[in-house]
Image (cartoon, rainbow, N blue to C red):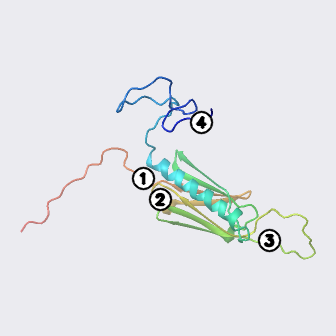
Amino acid sequence: AGAHRRGEPHGRDPDVEQGADDGPGQFQDAAHGYDCRMAQRRDIDRVRSEMEELFADLCQHRLAPQRAGFRPRVDAYRTEDPPALHVVVELAGVDPAAVDLALADGILAVSGERRRPAAKGRRYEHMEIDYGRFERRIALGEEIDADAVEARYQHGLLTIVLPLAARPTGPVRVQVTRGGEE
């Protein structure tokens, strides 16, 4: 009674309306109302990056919990005035002198180490804070003015300001010069 024949629509199929048969080649709007427009390239890159981060977190916490180090949390946002990308990395307890920043091929790499305080005279009852080496790679997706990058560490947060490279605001006129004629 609960089974249906293969190929026959039933009430649980989202795109099936009772009695609707327009024949082959006829398309209707889907009943679920989703719009199937193509996503912008940077949206796809963002989703890909988020998926890579998710799988990296999964590998670190589920498949390889004995791995040393940790993965600091990161926020990134853009401002228009002045045009810049801001990357904020949560690094509580990390000596700012132990942090390395590198910018290459549109990737910002933040790495360093958070050291566990000496345990002399201590017996831990509960441990949740991660210590050791860390590294985060953030795809920027924009041209950066590398000479104007600034980094500030305050209250356990490392804020990196990456000014966007100047782009022409309108049409650019290029003058053609005549080469030396002999």
Q: How many marks?
A: 4
**Disc 3, disc 1: CB below 8 Å?**
no
Tell me the tag on residue 40.
none
Residue type, numbered disc 4: Ala
Q: CA distance from mark 3 to mark 4?
A: 61 Å
Q: Residue at x 88, y 63 (%)?
A: 126
Q: CA distance from mark 4 to mark 1?
A: 63 Å
SS for callout 3: loop
Q: Is residue 145 found left or right of 177 in the rendered image? A: right
Q: Nearer the viewer, residue 169 or 59?
A: 59
Sooner in the amino-acid sequence: mark 3 or mark 1: 3
Residue that carries the numbered disc 4 in the rendered image: 3
User: Neighbour class for label 3 at 10 Å: few (<14), some, many (≥20)?
Assistant: few
Q: Residue at x 81, y 62 (%)?
A: 128
Q: Is residue 61 found left or right of 20 in the rendered image? A: right
Q: Position of residue 139 (x, y in %)?
A: 52, 58
Residue that carries the numbered disc 3 in the rendered image: 116
**Disc 4, disc 1: CB below 8 Å?**
no
Name the outermost residue toward the left. Answer: 182
* The quarter of the displayed image where residue 59 is located: bottom right
Sooner in the amino-acid sequence: mark 2 or mark 4: 4
Q: Residue at x 37, y 29 (%)?
A: 23
Q: CA distance from mark 3 to mark 1?
A: 43 Å
Residue that carries the numbered disc 1 in the rendered image: 166
SS for callout 4: loop
Residue that carries the numbered disc 2 in the rendered image: 145
